[in-house]
Amino acid sequence: MSGDNPYADGRGNKDRSIANPHGAGDAPYPGKSGKAVPVGGDAPFLIGEAMTGGYGKGPDILHECTIAVNPGEIAVIVGPNGAGKSTAMKAVFGMLNVRSGRVLLDGEDITALSPQDRVIKGMGFVPQVRNIFPSMTVEENLEMGAFIRKDDIRQTMEQVYELFPILKDKRGQAAGELSGGQRQQVAVGRALMTKPKVLMLDEPTAGVSPIVMDELFDRIIEVSRTGIPILMVEQNAKQALEIADRGYVLVQGRNGHTGTGKELLADPEVRQSFLGG
């Protein structure tokens, strides 16, 4: 990361206890070191590999698309409207048909699993819309996030409140009464309540002000410091690449450019085509 990147200072794993290397529920775990393997190496922690597919019986939207992320990394998917960014995220999460290619989580092929089973295996997914229960309180939303757990959730909830202090202040308030940025914090916090192996965010800053976007990105960096890999789709490409360890620029459902966030920000073609010069 660049030395003049305001988001990069202090990056590095801190308290890993909110992350769960064993996944959620009773799913078995084969036992890995947790050490990050460079994306593009032999064993990315999460990879959607050469994915081709679309919704239902419709045409293919993705064409041999590959995205991956490792522990402690933030990987972002950017590109023009209609490029297949959210579709790629949904493919990794099992929400559309992958007609060829595969999805691996910590070396295990999960391509055939339903989204619900992927949550049990350790995926936390925050959709762009309808990602909270507006009539429930903040605390009730977080409790709902832990529905698959059988252990004591109080420590995890306190960790979520440490990451998002405003949620502790408003824990008894209906989530639907919060600001857009605060609702997004509830949605991310609810996903963290499963103690996921990997966190997936579909346009977390959609519809929020630049100030709130900066705050959300700061919180996303804090989550990554716990060791949780973060895979994120983001419309605000330049800002997202500034915090990214790895970036994927999709064009018409295909990999257009791949590299570190710094490399993509410095690439003249990426800058001209996708970052406004």
Image (cartoon, grey):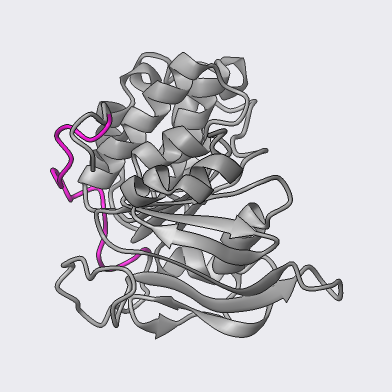
Question: What span is in magenta?
Answer: 7-24
Identity of the residue furthest to the front in this view: 268
Decide if residue 144 is on the left or right side of residue 227.
Answer: right
Identity of the residue furthest to the right in this view: 58
Residue 210 x, y percent position in the rendering:
49, 18
Decide if residue 148 is on the left or right side of residue 72.
Answer: right
Instruction: Identify the residue at image location x=74%, y=67%.
Output: 61
Q: Nearer the viewer, residue 214 or 251?
A: 251
Residue 150 x, y percent position in the rendering:
36, 58
Instruction: Identify the residue at image location x=51%, y=16%.
Output: 173
Decide if residue 141 is on the left or right side of residue 3.
Answer: right
Instruction: Tell me if residue 104 comes above or below residue 39 in the rendering.
Output: below
Residue 71 x, y percent position in the rendering:
26, 60
Instruction: Tell me if residue 275 comes above or below residue 208 in the rendering.
Output: below
Residue 8 in view of the camera? yes
- Location of residue 116 (image quadrant): bottom right
- Location of residue 21 (image quadrant): bottom left
Instruction: Identify the residue at image location x=44%, y=61%.
Output: 258
Query: Is most of the magenta stretch helix, strand or loop?
Result: loop
Magenta-drawn stretch contains 105: no
Q: Nearer the viewer, residue 27 or 271?
A: 271
Quadrant containing the N terminus is top left
Residue 148 in view of the camera? no
Magenta-drawn stretch contains 12: yes
Instruction: Tell me if residue 89 comes above or below residue 5 in the rendering.
Output: below
Residue 200 x, y percent position in the rendering:
47, 52
